[in-house]
Amino acid sequence: MVFIKKIDLYILKRFFTLFVMTFLIVIFILLMQFLWKHFADLVGKGIGWDVLAEFFLYAAMTLVPLALPLALLLASLMTFGNLGENFELTAMKSAGISLFRIIRPLIISVSLIVVAAFFFSDNVLPKSQRNMYTLLFSIKHKSPELDVPVGEFYSGINGVNLYVRSKEQGLLKDLMIYDFSNGFNNATVIVADSGRIQITGDKKYLLLTLMNGESFENLREQKMSGSNHIPYRRETFARKEVLYDFDSDFNRYDKSLLQDRHVSKNIKELSHSIDSVKLIIKERSASQVQEMLQYRYFSGGVSWEILLEPDKNIDIKKYNSDSLFLNLEKSEMELAVNQAKERAKSMLEKIEYNKIMLGEPQMYINQHSSEWHKKFALSFACLIFFFIGAPLGAIIRKGGFGFPVVISVLMFVIYYIIDLTGYKMARENIWEAYQGMWLSSAILLPIGVFLTYKAAIDATLFSPETYVKMINTIKTKIFGVFKTRIVK
């Protein structure tokens, strides 16, 4: 603490107070947006609060890399905006303290945050994403909580639609059941005056006890060959019990389900996967080239080695396809054309197959390479956003949640659009992975350097008088040129 000046403590306190607050606010907003996206998968499943709390925790941790740059931008912009609005920044500069000396403790602190963010992305984030997506997949495949509505069809039972006209003390009145579990051509229709629903003790099945009704079932599978009549079965009952599959337990899927996904790997695992798949692509490419040369391009009775060595005493003209074709009879021409079509079709199918054999591993590499660069690019983006927010706040000198929030959201939206565009370009193999994932940093870095320079020289970048003066100067020069030409 001896080496930390009071001014450094003052700046750090102002910054980290706003940083923690904005970080939590951004996490909350992003989490609400994420939950709204998966709202239909969570509602009506009867999930316990412990599972939901675990899901929220994993979701919040996966949103940290997205929330951290925005929080740093907003906190730095508000910190220096408040200092400028209260003339504290002016007082510091008048005392001979430069802007770089003022932000020096924040540069060191933000650099530590950037390093911590990288280790978080490399070690904590892959596990969080794997656990979150596994949990989300498990929740999606859980049967919905049993709550049969009145006056509409209930489709919560797999392959079954249930209609209930009314309820009375747990008793269902006027039931209609359409069972399509064996296909629409073998549907079973059941109607009953009343009935009850209960879940078996092992919570694996749903037991329907029906009273006073009848059922109709097609027996299409028992149709006699050569007959147009479809047998059916019609039954009238006073009491009937029907059992349906209805697993109401929450079953967690194994976390190894997403073990090979790029979102579940750290830097070392991503590098290993990329190198392994590159070897596979290299072997498949060499095999395809060899096959094409031997069996596709130089087939038909002539050795491809001979065609590739024109030094030997061979009359190439006798292999001219146009001459051979024109000397054929009409029937032979038709046969040759048909054979050529079949060979072209076969070649096209082979090319499509080779494309799939190389396209899937290439997509795998693109995803892993993009994720590899993303871990570095996101951490570096935090540093860039700080050098955009701090000088911008010093220039505009506006604090609070008004103008800084607008500027921060606008800058972050631009960054997100550029970053998403670069990721899609890299994923589709249009650009290299490093080009797509570093595109946003390459665009925003000059902006940060420019704003830092303007703030260091106390430039009035957003002053209307500056731009009015610039426009008047340009007008004067233009009119001066025209007057000179008219006089001549």
Image (tube, rainbow, N blue to C red):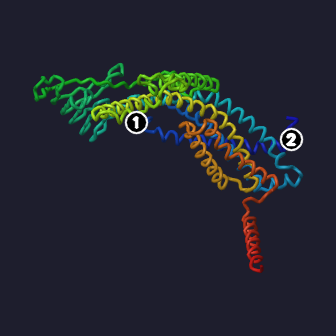
Residue at 71% across, 43% down: 384
Residue lying furthest right in this view? 96
Instruction: Decide if residue 185 is on the left or right side of residue 373.
Output: left
In the rendered image, residue 483, in percent from the top left (x then y), is placed at: 76, 78
Location of the C terminus (image quadrant)? bottom right
Residue at 43% across, 35% down: 41
In the rendered image, residue 419, in percent from the top left (x then y), is placed at: 60, 42
Q: Decide if residue 57 is in sight here.
A: no
Rendered position, 86 above or below 123: below
Rendered position, 181 above or below 12: above
Instruction: Decide if residue 3 is on the left or right side of residue 198.
Output: right
The residue that disc 1 covers is 322
Instruction: Decide if residue 176 is on the left or right side of residue 111.
Output: left
**Circle 2 sits in a helix, a strand or a loop, which is it?**
loop
Rendered position, 277 above or below 33: above
- Which mark is first along the chain, 1 or 2? 2
- Residue type pointed to by label 2: Lys
**Circle 1 sits in a helix, a strand or a loop, which is it?**
helix
Looking at the picture, tell me which residue is in the foreground, 300 or 374: 300
Instruction: Tell which tag, 2 or 1, sits nearer the viewer.
Output: 1
Looking at the picture, tell me which residue is in the foreground, 462 or 445: 445
**Quarter of image, res 372:** top right
CB within 8 Å, label 2 to label 1: no
* Image disc number at residue 5: 2
